[in-house]
Image: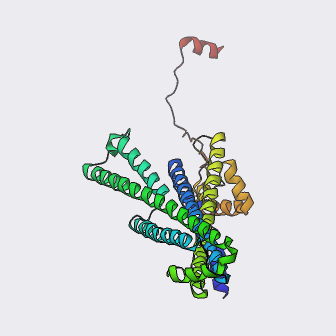
C-alpha cells in the first residue's frame, strides 16, 4: 500500500496546457475554428429537436383535449377532419423524405460548409515552399472530396427545407386541432371522428402514451446535445486562455513564452554547467532543489590531483681549480722591490 502511494506521489502533475505547448499558433487557431463550427452545429441540432418536441407536446395536449371532449356532431367536422387528414399525410411524407436525407448525409450543414471552405482553400492556395506542393494523387483526392462535399451540401439544403416544412405542417395540425377544440358543442363528435379518421394519431390513452415516450426520447437527445455543447465550450475556453497566455508571453520576449520552466530541464542545465536565467533560479528556489543541484554538481566534478611542491633550486657548485701563475711585468716587479 505504501509502495503504491510513493508511486502515486512520484508521478508528475499534468498541467492544463501541457498538450498544447507543442502545437503551433496555426494549429491552435484551426482547432478553435473547428470547435466553434461544431458548437454551432450542435446548438442548431439541439434547437431543431427542441422545436420538434414542442410541436409534439402541443399535439399531445390537443389530443388529450379531443379525448376529453364528449359532444355531438358538428357541421364543420367533415371539413376540419378532411383538412387535418391531408396535413397529417403530407407531414408523414415530408418527415420520411427528411429522415432519408439525414440518413444519407449525416453531417450537419455547418460542418459540410466548413469542410468545403477548407478544401477549396487548400486547392486554390499555392504554398510559398514549392517542395510542399501536393502531388497528383493527393490533389486528385482533394478534388474528389470537394465535389463530394458539394453534392452533400445540396442534399443537406433540401433536408433542411424539408425539416422546416415538417415543422410548419405540425403547426398547421395544431391550428386545426385548436379549431376543433373551439367547437365546444361538438367536442364529443370530433373525438369520435378523430378515432375513426386518424389511425396513426388516435386520440386514446395508448396513442398519447406513445407520443409521450417519443417526447421523452427527444428530451434525452436534447440533454445529450447540451452535454456535448458544454464540453465543446469548455475546450474552446481552454484554447482561448492558452492563446492569451502565449500572446502575453510573446510581448515581453519575442519567440519565447513566459511560461514557468520545467523543473527537470532546469536541473539538467544546472548539472551540465550551462547558464541559468532568473526564471530558472526562481523555479529551483521554489522547489528547494538549488542546494541539491549544487551538491550533485560538486559530486560529479572530477577531483583535482594534489599539487606537488616546487623543487628547490640547488645552488651552483663551483670547484676550486688551480690556474696558471701570473707573470709580473717589469714595472710591477720594480714596485714590489720598493
Closer to the camera in the image, 331 or 274: 274
Query: Vertically, is 217 above or below 31?
Result: below
Please say whether residue 306 is visible from this viewpoint. Answer: no
- Residue at the location (36% across, 41% down)? 124
Closer to the camera in the image, 72 or 251: 72
- Residue at the location (66% across, 73% down)? 181
Closer to the camera in the image, 69 or 166: 69
Closer to the camera in the image, 78 or 252: 78
Image position, residue 182 (x, y; %): 68, 70
Q: Quadrant of the N terminus?
A: bottom right
Query: Vertically, is 265 above or below 3?
Result: above
Image position, residue 53 (x, y; %): 60, 71
Image position, residue 325 (x, y; %): 51, 27
Query: Vertically, is 79 above or below 120?
Result: below
Query: Vertically, is 204 above or below 85?
Result: below
- Residue at the location (50% across, 61% down)? 165
Image position, residue 119 (x, y; %): 39, 50
Q: Quadrant of the C terminus?
A: top right
How many discs mark residues in the rendered view? 0
Q: Is residue 25 left or right of residue 147?
A: right
Q: Quadrant of residue 100?
A: bottom left
- Identify the residue at the far front of this view: 75
- Identify the residue at the far left of this view: 136
Please say whether residue 213 is visible from this viewpoint. Answer: yes
Colouring convention used in this rendered image of the protein: rainbow
Amino acid at each position: 500500500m505504501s509502495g503504491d502511494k510513493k508511486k502515486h506521489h512520484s508521478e508528475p502533475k499534468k498541467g492544463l496546457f501541457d498538450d498544447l505547448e507543442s502545437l503551433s499558433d496555426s494549429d491552435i487557431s484551426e482547432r478553435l475554428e473547428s470547435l466553434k463550427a461544431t458548437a454551432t452545429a450542435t446548438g442548431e441540432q439541439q434547437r431543431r429537436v427542441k422545436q420538434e418536441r414542442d410541436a409534439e407536446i402541443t399535439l399531445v395536449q390537443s389530443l388529450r383535449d379531443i379525448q376529453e371532449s364528449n359532444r355531438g356532431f358538428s357541421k364543420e367536422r367533415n371539413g376540419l377532419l378532411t383538412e387535418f387528414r391531408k396535413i397529417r399525410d403530407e407531414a408523414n411524407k415530408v418527415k420520411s423524405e427528411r429522415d432519408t436525407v439525414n440518413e444519407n448525409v449525416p453531417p450537419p450543414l455547418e460542418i459540410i460548409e466548413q469542410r468545403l471552405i477548407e478544401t477549396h482553400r487548400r486547392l486554390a492556395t499555392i504554398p510559398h515552399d514549392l517542395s510542399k506542393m501536393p502531388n497528383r494523387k493527393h490533389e486528385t483526392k482533394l478534388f474528389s472530396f470537394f465535389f463530394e462535399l458539394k453534392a452533400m451540401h445540396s442534399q443537406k439544403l433540401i433536408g433542411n427545407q424539408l425539416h422546416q416544412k415538417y415543422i410548419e405542417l405540425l403547426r398547421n395540425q395544431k391550428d386545426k386541432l385548436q379549431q376543433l377544440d373551439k367547437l365546444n358543442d361538438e367536442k364529443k363528435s370530433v373525438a369520435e371522428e378523430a378515432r375513426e379518421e386518424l389511425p396513426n394519431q388516435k386520440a386514446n390513452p395508448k396513442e398519447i402514451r406513445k407520443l409521450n415516450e417519443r417526447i421523452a426520447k427527444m428530451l434525452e437527445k436534447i440533454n445529450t446535445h447540451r452535454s456535448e455543447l458544454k464540453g465543446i465550450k469548455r475546450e474552446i475556453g481552454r484554447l482561448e486562455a492558452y492563446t492569451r497566455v502565449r500572446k502575453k508571453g510573446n510581448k515581453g520576449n519575442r519567440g519565447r513564452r513566459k511560461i514557468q520552466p520545467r523543473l527537470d530541464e532546469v536541473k539538467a542545465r544546472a548539472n551540465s554547467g550551462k547558464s541559468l536565467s532568473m526564471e530558472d533560479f526562481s523555479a529551483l528556489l521554489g522547489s528547494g532543489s538549488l542546494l541539491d543541484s549544487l551538491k550533485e554538481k560538486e559530486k560529479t566534478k572530477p577531483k583535482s590531483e594534489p599539487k606537488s611542491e616546487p623543487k628547490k633550486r640547488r645552488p651552483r657548485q663551483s670547484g676550486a681549480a688551480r690556474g696558471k701563475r701570473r707573470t709580473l711585468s717589469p714595472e710591477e716587479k720594480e714596485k714590489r722591490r720598493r
